Image (tube, coloured by chain):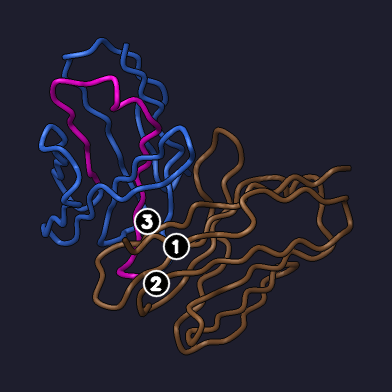
Amino acid sequence: SQQGEEDPQALSIQEGENATMNCSYKTSINNLQWYRQNSGRGLVHLILIRSNEREKHSGRLRVTLDTSKKSSSLLITASRAADTASYFCATFGTGANNLFFGTGTRLTVIP
Amino acid sequence: DTAVSQTPKYLVTQMGNDKSIKCEQNLGHDTMYWYKQDSKKFLKIMFSYNNKELIINETVPNRFSPKSPDKAHLNLHINSLELGDSAVYFCASSHGRDTQYFGPGTRLTVL
């Protein structure tokens, strides 16, 4: 299976704290993408990081990629209640035709 | 304007019926996808469709068939619905292997 795994499965923090989610995958990749899903809604793209990149930033989001360990992390700084959602990593494998999604991390930010 | 739209948003039907879900994207993307999200929130690729080339996930029953009248549309037709087909179905589109844009989802309930 090319499915990634995310850790932790659930995370609960206080508003203002940082949240870190990790993703591990199994195959070589072209790129890795992070998505957010609010309850009952569709997925929203956050960041795409290519296999030759090691770190990317977007606002309060920071993504790292370690292809030697086949892992990535998503850091959300200064979390807000509105960040409460499920976060998924997804990999586009080398030679693949589609994304394979991880199992997701459910983040709850307590006001 | 909505980038990726799906209809209907909710679909409740009896076992054995045939139903269709429609998807349209106005982003000019060349690739469209269908995903199934089960009750545990696991997102699984069903089909990807690029320039009339259909890539099928081998685990998808042949009761499911995608139909693409043109590049902007990828509809999902399901024959002989079963209880296990109950899930949320998401359409998405992208330009090649880049960011995927998801529709709002169709919640299918089979009674």
**Residue shown at the point (26%, 59%) measured from the top left:** B31
Is B65 on the left-hand or right-hand side of B104?
left
Q: Indicate whether B42 appears above or below A65.
A: above
Query: Is residue A104 toward the left or the right of residue A92 in the image?
Result: right
Dot 3 alpha-carbon crowd within 10 angstroms: few under 14, some 14 to 19, many 20 or more: some
Q: Give the chain letter for blue.
A: B
On what subunit does the disc labeled 3 rest? B
Q: Amino acid at mark 2?
A: Lys
Left or right: residue B61 compared with residue A59: left
Q: Residue tagged by mark 1? A: A4
Q: Which residue corresponds to mark 3?
A: B27
Seen from the viewer's position, the closer of residues B89 and A18 is A18
Verify CB contact (< 8 Å) between mark 2 and mark 3.
no
Q: In front: B29, or B59?
A: B59
Label annotation for residue B47: none
For the residue labelled by badge 1, is the local secondary structure a helix, a strand or a loop? loop
Q: Which residues are magenta?
A: B73-97
Disc 2: host chain: A
The picture places residue A32, in percent across and down from the top left corner, at 46, 71
Instruction: Give, as a three-letter code, the residue at label 3.
Output: Leu
Q: Which residue carries the number 2 mark?
A: A26
For the residues beneath circles 1 and 2, the answer to whether they share a chain is: yes
Query: Marks 1/3: CA distance?
Result: 28 Å
Residue B49 lies within the magenta run: no
